[in-house]
Amino acid sequence: MTNYADFTYYVSTYKGAVIDTASLYLYARKATLEIKKYTLGNVDEANIPDDVKMCCCEVAEALFKADQEDTKGIASEKVGEYTVSYVSHEAKEKLLSVSVRSIIYNWLAMTGLLYRGC
């Protein structure tokens, strides 16, 4: 499987600075799989459009940031009379899913790649 974006594209064209070299391959692969899920694999891997590459970079960053967040799931904390609120794992996953879908639709809505037929 070919990742839709590589580190050179991520740094030089997308101008990304969030994901390090070692992690980009993993997150670009995850982003590629998410994009394939929405496009039903209709992206020509021999000639990947720039919109798809940019989308891959943005989705990879969203996935990376989600993994880097506090794993305890703390939503808020109050110091006086110590109070802590937690976010469930399911809620965090749902929020990430909505974010990824939004990114994919923003980049690919007008490309015809999301068309599922009549």
Image (cartoon, rainbow, N blue to C red):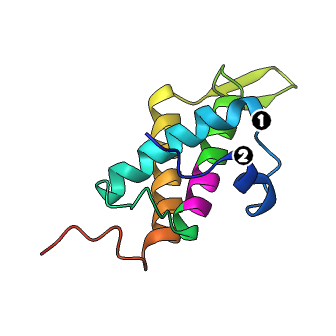
* Depth check, front residue: 70 or 49: 49
Q: Residues within 10 Å of mark 1 (few under 14, many from 20)?
A: some
Q: Secondary structure at mark 2?
A: helix
Residue 91 locus on image (x, y percent):
48, 36
Predominant SS along the magenta part: helix
Q: Which residue is most to the right?
A: 80
Image point (35%, 69%), residue name: 113
Which residue is label 1 attached to? 21
Tags 2 and 1 in contact by the CB under 8 Å rule?
A: yes
Question: Residue 69: in sight, yes or no?
Answer: no
Residue 68 locus on image (x, y percent):
71, 30
* Depth check, front residue: 50 or 107: 50
Which residue is label 2 attached to? 7
Q: Is residue 94 above or below residue 70?
A: below
Residue 102 locus on image (x, y percent):
49, 61
Q: Is residue 87 left or right of residue 35?
A: right
Question: Residue 103: in sight, yes or no?
Answer: yes
What amino acid is found at the position of numbered circle 1 in the picture?
Thr
| Magenta-colored span | 53-59
Image point (76%, 40%), residue name: 19
Q: Is residue 36 above or below residue 30?
A: below
Q: Is residue 39 above or below residue 118?
A: above
Residue 56 locus on image (x, y percent):
56, 54
Q: Which residue is most to the left?
A: 118
The reply to whether the magenta stretch includes residue 54 is yes
